[in-house]
Amino acid sequence: MIAEISYLGAIRKAVVDLQKPLTLFCGPNSTGKTYLSYLLYAIFENTDYVESKGLDKIVKHFYEYKEFTLNRELVENFIQDVAASMKAKLGSIFGIGDLAVDKLFSQFELSLILSDRDYERILESPCRLISKNGEKEFGIVKDASSDKVIYHMNGENSTIGRDSLMGLRLMINHFFRLLCFRNSGGVRMLTVERNSIYTFKTELSLGRNELIDRIQQKSDRSELDILDMVNSSSRRYPLAVRSSLRIANDLENVQKFNSPYYEIAELIEKGILQGQVKITRTGDVEFVSDKVGKTKHLPIHLTSSIVKTMSSLVIYLKHIARNGDLLIIDEPEMNFHPNVQISLMQIFAILTKLDLRIIISTHSDYMIREVNNLIMAGTIYAKDAQLIKELGYDENMLLNKNDIAVKYFNYGKLKRLLDVVDVKVEDDGFAIESIDSTISKQNRITETLFDYLQED
């Protein structure tokens, strides 16, 4: 799926292929990289009802015949309905009020383009949305490699009651959400706040903050509408942060599932953290260091910055990640020594080979250079595999230039709006202008100062 974005804050235009195995967002600060990341996350994470005339017609047909045939036009129309609905949700996505939305995003536009491969994947994948009411099980089902969508029900009465029409409309809407955006993989964003999510999860409890917000707003009234408080969505934090808080407060249940990427998480623990990130039976996060013995469990707030920052990724890979997921990481280099940044980039490369799509926003020259090394190593491997192995690279971490997209964010001469441009990736990698020019300038200054000292 291709996302075309216009007038998102400072961004005049950006185009992102959401099926690329690895995408890098690069450029100076305050150029919209996080804005774009938040928006891409929300496209896949949002589950709100979407007004869709095409689905309304399907509901009437489905009510009568209990089945319909999927077609590309129906799927594309729904995806565009989702895109059109995003503008009304920007306040919730970014955690801001309506006045700020009007000021920052008045010209915002989003278009989502379905590729041939996207539609083939939708047809190939099974999709089931099942609900239970007592002994009755009902829902909407599409089998693998089929374009038939049928009403599924176990129980005495297989008809759809007229009083269930609104519920059916909601179910079909949610079914199409799953079919188009979540069925071939979920989405997770690790924001820059990840280093404190588990440390302060009790204090940052989403439910508590929402309740406090609403009570404060209504404290001058004689009566408080508790239902209104529950249903009103807080904008204290962006959507991606709120989602992280919900996960942090549900770790007791999260740990019950083992992800297919569990072993990759263990590689990070063994090779980088030198210890284990553990979730207790009560849902708290602890760290057991290999250096001090297995009996000493450190609560997360007493651990080093690398453990605090890396724990979100480790828990995601152990217990949350699914095949086909889109993982978005804002500044993965945060708090990390250069050698850790290099090792982490190698881990990301391995994950892209295991059906995980990754979008990274980075300022790290070390991570960019390691991507370039992995591209060059991938190019050379067929000719001289022994050389690549001697340099310390395994075949499963080598990158193909065609699997990588690099997006460069920077202002033009007007310094008001910017177009996100594609950086060409060659057999020897790519260059990021703002980083290379900064390093060159610093090197020139260093050489000048060193030469002056040598003259003395």
Image (cartoon, rainbow, N blue to C red):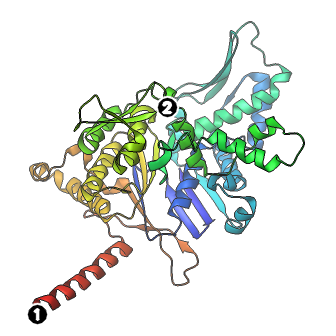
- Give yes or no for contact between labels 1 and 2 (Cβ–Cβ under 8 Å): no
Say which residue label 1 marks.
455
Q: Is 143 in front, or is 39?
A: 39
Q: Is residue 155 above or below residue 411?
A: above
Residue 356, visible in the rendered structure:
no
Instruction: Find numbered disc 2 in the image and state the secondary structure of the residue it sits on.
Output: helix
Q: Residue furthest right?
A: 222
**Residue 114, horizontal then vertical, whole percent:** 56, 49
Q: Is 382 in front, or is 10?
A: 10
In the picture, the disc for residue 180 is none
Compared across the picture, whether 324 is left or right of 217 comes to: left
**Residue 171, horizontal then vertical, whole percent:** 71, 30
Amino acid under label 1? Answer: Glu
Question: Quadrant where the C terminus lies?
Answer: bottom left
Compared across the picture, whether 439 is left or right of 260 comes to: left
Residue ID at (21%, 88%): 448
In the picture, the disc for residue 251 is 2
**Residue 117, horizontal then vertical, whole percent:** 49, 44
